[in-house]
Each structure stands twice: as C-alpha cells, then as structure tokens.
Image (spheres, helix red, strand yellow):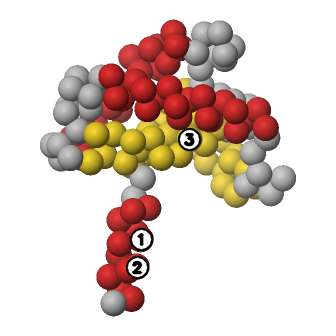
Amino acid sequence: MTIVAIEWINGHFLTFAAMASIRQEKVSGIIQKELSMIFQRESTGLCLGSMVTVTVVRISPDLGVARCYLSIFAGPDPKEVFANLDRNKALIRHELSQITKNQLRRVPELMFFIDDSLDYAEEIDRLLD
C-alpha cells in the first residue's frame, strides 16, 4: 500500500492510502449511500433547499475518520450551505449511526469538504478552447 497523504487532524496524524482495503471500501460505500439519503430527506432543513451530492467518501485505515466530499447545486450560496452542514455535523453523524447501527460498530468522525472537481474540469476545458 502506497501512502498518498499524511494529515494532522484533531491531534492525530492520519494517513490516507492509494489502495483502500476491502473493508474501507465497504464502509465508504455505506456512508456515501446513507449520507446521500439523509441529505435528500433533509434538503429543506440541513441543505437549505439546495441539492447536495456526496461525490466521494474516503476512510482512514483505522476507520475512525471519514472525509466526505460534497457537491452543492441549485440553492443559496454553496458556502452558506456548507457552513450549515459543518455546524450540524454531530446531528448528521447521530442520524447516520441510527441508520447504520446494524452495519457498523461505530460511525467514523465526519469531515466535510467541497468537491471542486467539476469546477476544475470546466476551467481546463475553458483553457483548452
């Protein structure tokens, strides 16, 4: 396994590897699916009426931290929506734990990031034209 990144988060060094284990992939798939459902159900409250898509979930090797990349469309300012989601992280994690209580021993700490890959691709297309 090749180490891609080492980050200092909440007093711990976390390593994120290029090749995730099968368990990491399963847990990230479960979290991605269930977070998508939570954001769909709570679109008016948590998402302030905008559409939030969970594009990628990356899990640390110890399954303690989940980095969730979100795309935010159609609604108020994406930074405002992101700030609201970040403030309600504990509520989202609790709801996720209630949904996945039969699948996961413990729900990892959630960290949200804005996924800007679509903006990056559009910028590359614009530069190529």
Q: Amino acid at mark 2?
A: Ile
Left or right of residue 106: residue 19: right
Closer to the camera in the image, 113 or 46:
46
Closer to the camera in the image, 86 or 125:
125
> Where does residue 21 sit, x and y in percent of width and height?
79, 41
Quarter of the figure with residue 14:
top right
Q: CA distance from mark 2 to mark 3?
A: 24 Å
Q: Secondary structure at mark 1?
A: helix
Q: Which mark is residue 121?
A: 1
Quarter of the figure with the C terminus: bottom left
| Residue for point 66% across, 16% down | 103
* Res 72 seen here: yes
Left or right of residue 125: residue 57: right
Q: Amino acid at mark 3?
A: Val
Q: Are marks 2 and 1 in contact (CB under 8 Å)?
A: yes
Q: Are marks 1 and 3 in contact (CB under 8 Å)?
A: no
| Residue for point 57% across, 35% down | 66
Quarter of the figure with residue 91:
top left
Q: Secondary structure at mark 3?
A: strand
- Residue wearing tag 2: 124
| Residue for point 48% across, 36% down | 111
Q: CA distance from mark 2 to mark 1?
A: 5 Å
Q: CA distance from mark 1 to mark 3?
A: 20 Å
* Res 67 seen here: no
Left or right of residue 70: residue 64: right
- Residue wearing tag 3: 57
